[in-house]
Image (cartoon, grey):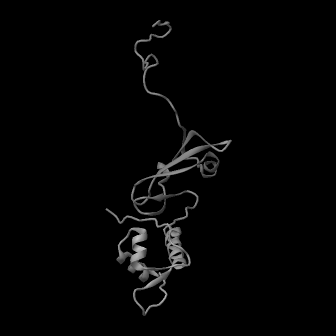
Amino acid sequence: MGKRKRKYNPNLVRARHSYTFSEIAELYQIHPRTVQSWRKQGLKVIDEVSKPYLVIGEEIRQFLKEKAQKRKHPLKIGEFFCPKCRVPRKSLPDKLSIEITDRKLGKTHRQAIIKGVCEVCSCRLFLFSSDRKTQKLAEPNMIQTEHKTTLIGSGDSSVNTDIKRGENVKS
């Protein structure tokens, strides 16, 4: 199992306060050694010589925002985020399909689910978009389908089995 990525809220610290490593660890419910590793990754302390190390809240905020920004992977047109490779990847062209759903996005557009298979690891890929954006992406070899919303079962079934269709039942 891979390492779990955590999201740390930078707004939990006050910008003009100073914090020790143990206070930061307690605030984010992490081990103090994690904060020590953050220092090695670039978290700036007030004074390198005096201990315990103190960190200004604004530095913590800036460090956590930069850390979150590094994890983002902007996608180009035709790319998916592969959960197995953990990077943007293209799909195999013969496995690419678009499914237009009945869900509305705004007043005029509908939701589209773009499905594919990773060209490197063969993992299934999904991307939620709008039908307007998929028109730019659509190629001649791409399969485009309408999403069908149907209930499974017979038309004669009823929750209340005492009532027959077309009959008035008196209590």
Residue 139 position in % (x across, y down): 59, 49
* Residue 30 shows up from this direction: yes
Q: Quadrant of residue 78?
A: bottom right
Vertical placement of 113 versus 154: above or below? below
- Which one is in front, 92 or 58? 58
Name above or below for residue 145 compared with residue 84: above
Q: Residue at x 55, y 61 (%)?
A: 75
Q: Is residue 96 visible?
A: no
Residue at image location 42% in from the left, 83% down from the top? 40
Image spot of residue 69 (x, y percent) = 53, 70
Kindly give the residue lying farthest to the right in the view shown: 107
Residue extending farthest to the front is 17
Q: How many marks?
A: 0
Residue furthest out toward the left:
1
Q: What percent of the width, then of the height, locates residue 122?
A: 40, 55
| Quadrant location, the C terminus | top left
For the view shown, which residue lies furthest in the bottom direction? 49
Q: Quadrant of the N terminus?
A: bottom left
Q: Position of residue 70 (x, y in %)?
A: 50, 71
Q: Is residue 119 left or right of residue 1?
A: right
Q: Quadrant of residue 162?
A: top left
Left or right side of 87 for 105: right
Residue drawn at (47%, 7%), measured in percent from left and top? 169
